[in-house]
């Protein structure tokens, strides 16, 4: 089975520090806007994406946007 890893940019309202990267599957975590956090990186499949989104929900962070870049 071929795994298509796509790159995602997930923006949330609130602050998450880079120390949360491992918990979010190795996503890069940056704050480029006041009181917003950007999680970016490759996600192995839809199940992993939903896992990240569930963690965002569990932290009570409002989801602002999700952008997907197709696999190369």
Image: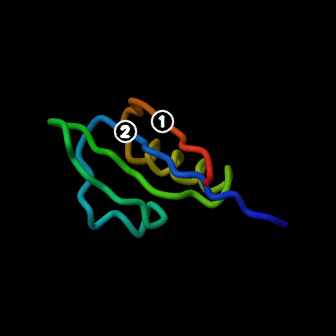
Q: Residue at x 36, y 64 (%)?
A: 21
Q: Position of residue 43 (x, y in %)?
A: 57, 57
Looking at the figure, which quarter contains the C terminus?
bottom right
- Measured along the vertical axis of the image, is residue 38 above or below residue 72? above
Q: What's the image's color scheme?
A: rainbow
Kind of element beneath mark 2: strand
Q: Residue at x 43, y 46 (%)?
A: 56
Residue 68 falls in image quadrant: top right
Q: Position of residue 66 (x, y in %)?
A: 48, 36
Residue positioned most to the left: 34
Who is closer to the viewer here, 62 or 48?
48
Residue positioned most to the top: 64
Q: Position of residue 22 (x, y in %)?
A: 41, 69
Looking at the figure, which quarter contains the N terminus?
bottom right
Who is closer to the viewer here, 44 or 54?
44
Query: Would residue 9 appear left or right of 7 to someone viewing this image?
Result: left
Q: Which mark is residue 66?
A: 1
- Measured along the vertical axis of the image, is residue 3 above or below residue 58? below
- Tag 1–tag 2 contact (CB < 8 Å): yes
Residue positioned most to the right: 1
Q: Residues within 10 Å of mark 2 (few under 14, many from 20)?
A: many
Q: Residues within 10 Å of mark 1 (few under 14, many from 20)?
A: some
* Separation of residues labelled 1 and 2 (CA atoms): 6 Å
Q: Residue at x 28, y 44 (%)?
A: 37
N-term-proximal mark, 1 vs 2: 2
Q: Which residue is mark 2?
A: 11
Q: Which mark is residue 53?
A: none
């Amino acid at each position: 089975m071929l795994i298509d890893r796509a790159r995602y940019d997930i923006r949330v309202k609130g602050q998450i520090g880079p120390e949360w990267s491992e918990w979010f599957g190795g996503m890069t975590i940056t704050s480029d806007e006041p009181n917003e956090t950007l999680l970016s990186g490759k996600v192995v499949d839809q199940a992993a994406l939903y896992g990240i989104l569930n963690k965002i929900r569990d932290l009570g962070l409002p989801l602002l946007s999700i952008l997907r870049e197709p696999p190369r």
